[in-house]
Image (cartoon, helix red, strand yellow):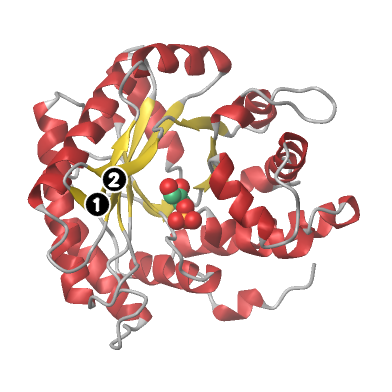
Amino acid sequence: MNASDLEAIAKAMVASGKGILAIDESHATCKKRFDSIAVEATPENRRAYRELLMTVPGGNEFLSGVILYDETMRQTTAQGVPFPDVLKQQGILPGIKVDTGAMKLAGSPNEKITEGLDGLRERLVEYKQLGACFAKWRAVITIGEGIPSARCIEANARALARYAALCQENGLVPIVEPEVLMEGDHDIARCFDVTQETLHQVFHALHSQHVALEGVILKASMVIPGGKCAAQASVQEVAAATVRCLRRSVPAAVPGVVFLSGGQSEEIATAHLNAMNQMGPHAWPLSFSYGRALQAPVLRVWRGMKENVRSAQSALYHREKCNSAACFGRYTPQMENYTA
Ligand code: 13P
């Protein structure tokens, strides 16, 4: 695969009005989500849930890709169709989370470094054989007293760049995800500064590792006050700060930026994306790659029961439709008045 093939995949990942569904929770995170609806976290329950998410009738109107976890990549529908094939049959690109998680940064226990570079080349070769077209690696930056440290940002940026270079070498488009966490009492200005510094370091590291920006998708966190900050920000403020930060930090060669939801409610995450797109045109398409903000309503409806699958799928279709409208700046709160 050459650079233009990677560029074509990256462009398809941010096709007009389409976004990416993140369902790549580790077993531990999936258990947390299942605990909230009293469903046991067994391989079969995870399989059934992920089948529900990937077989929404009409879901391909709004989705360009789905990010899977290792286990899901190897599982099948109840009828025995491998999940990567189920997606490809709908014209949706399968992706794979390849980091092995965020661990304590040595010497700084309140900060994290994402691991997973050892043996990554071999794993990428296998994932490509299993049908993956793109990959994801999430770095976590925590804001707090005296943190993030420069070395935490630098170490994570370097790991993201090494991962991205390996992905491109093996014909997979890397989603580069440096998440600045929403946890904490910091204000929006502090989030802006940390996000700006993080993005600068990430793009510097990508350049150092000779990563072709045309074959990368940035998955960004929004510039938003910490959850415990007394001064919360309006939708317009978050959108304006995020767009300003991206304009300062993200080269125009990047084919697209998709956002994580990071703990925002589903409707707020959609409203933020919508407001940003109303502020365009931008140098890159701005779209969604939400996990919780797409799945939360699905879990609430499904509750592990077969008879709820269809209404849970309608709930997901609805959220995808709202976020697709937000990609054009055409979302309105009235769109939320729907019944499954
Ligand atoms: P959230 O939208 O729940 O933050 O998850 C997106 C994701 O993929 C985080 O890595």
Please provide percent x and percent y for residue 290: 49, 54
First in sequence: mark 2 or mark 1?
Answer: 2
Most extreme residue toward the bottom is 230
Instruction: Tell me, for residue 109, which label it has, or none.
Output: 1
Q: Depth check: give the residue in front, 316 or 154.
A: 154
Residue 321: % across, % down:
61, 59
Q: Would residue 43 be visible to someone looking at this image? A: yes
Looking at the image, which residue is at 44% across and 38% down?
13
State which quadrant residue 12 falls in: top left
- Residue beneath label 2, please? 104
Q: Image point 24% across, 23% down: which residue?
A: 165
The quadrant of the rendering that contains the N terminus is top left
Q: Is residue 23 visible?
A: no
| Residue reaching furthest to the right | 307
Amino acid found under the numbered disc labelled 2: Lys
Please, is residue 213 above or below residue 233 in the view?
A: above
Q: How far apart are labels 2 and 1 at the CA level?
A: 5 Å
Q: Is label 2 within 8 A of ligand 1 (CB to nearest ligand atom)?
A: no
What SS does tag 2 mark?
Answer: strand
In contact (CB < 8 Å): disc 2 and disc 1 = yes
Q: Residues within 10 Å of mark 1 (few under 14, many from 20)?
A: few
User: Which amino acid, mark 1?
Assistant: Pro
Quarter of the image with the C terminus in it: bottom right
Q: Nearer the viewer, residue 286 or 178?
A: 178
